[in-house]
Amino acid sequence: MSNRRLVLAAFATAIVLAACGSEPEPEMAPEPTGPTAEELERMRQDSIRRAQEAEEARLRAEREAAERERQRRAEMSRQTLRETVYFDYDEAAIRSDTETRLRAKLDILRANPGVQLRMEGHADERGTSEYNIALGNERSEAVIQFLTGFGLDAGRFSSVSYGEERPAAQGSNESAWAQNRRVEFVITAGGDGIGR
């Protein structure tokens, strides 16, 4: 009898279910919890792009820093080349401090064979105009001889003398005279190529 009851119970359940018109609901696939393959690929490409942009920015910053340093050194070299040298009263002999300044110019001139300089000789106000023109010329020529004595081509240098006509300092005292006994340097060619 108990089998019969089970069969009847199962049959009754089937009838009730059929009468209700409902079938058991199909199981739903679980919602995806992570990105799709397409989203993963897009994220990977974005990551690669950001890494490339960061590397390009780093390289650009390095190039810009190197260029700033090159320009700084080139300007320092141009300043060294333009640095004035001084002489004793009524002398065209190269003093020790003048020699030090001229030696600083040598390496720059050797490294930049396209650079040409004009040496401008000057004198203080004492003496005649003619004498001071001659003295300024002797000073600029002494500088050229010093530089060419180290193997530099004389064709890279020219000279002019202004004598007492263009004083660096006004006054009739030793301080002014010392500043006026000088050779100044003008870069006449190749200055833009320094450090390239």
Image: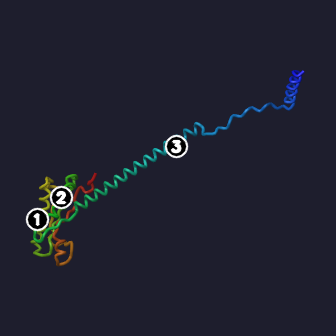
Q: For mark 2, give the secondary structure.
A: helix
| Disc nearest the viewer among 3 and 2 | 2
Marks 1 and 2, how far apart in space? 15 Å
Mark 3 or 2, nearer chain start:
3
Task: Relative to 26, say whether 96 is above or below.
Answer: below
Residue toward you, 24 or 132? 24
Q: Give the Cα distance between marks 3 and 2.
A: 57 Å
Q: How many marks?
A: 3
Q: Position of residue 90 (x, y in %)?
A: 10, 71
| Image location of residue 177, percent across then percent down | 16, 74
Q: Earlier in the sequence, mark 1 or mark 2?
A: 1
The amino acid marked with disc number 1 is Ala
Q: Residue furthest bottom?
A: 172
Residue found at the far right of this picture: 1
The amino acid type, in three-letter code, at marker 3 is Asp
Disc assigned to residue 93: 1
**At 14% from the left edge and 57% from the top edge, which residue is drawn?**
147
In this figure, which residue is indicated by the disc labeled 2?
Answer: 103
Q: CA distance from mark 1 to mark 3?
A: 71 Å
Residue 132 left/right relative to 187: left
User: Dots 1 and 3: beta carbons under 8 Å?
Assistant: no
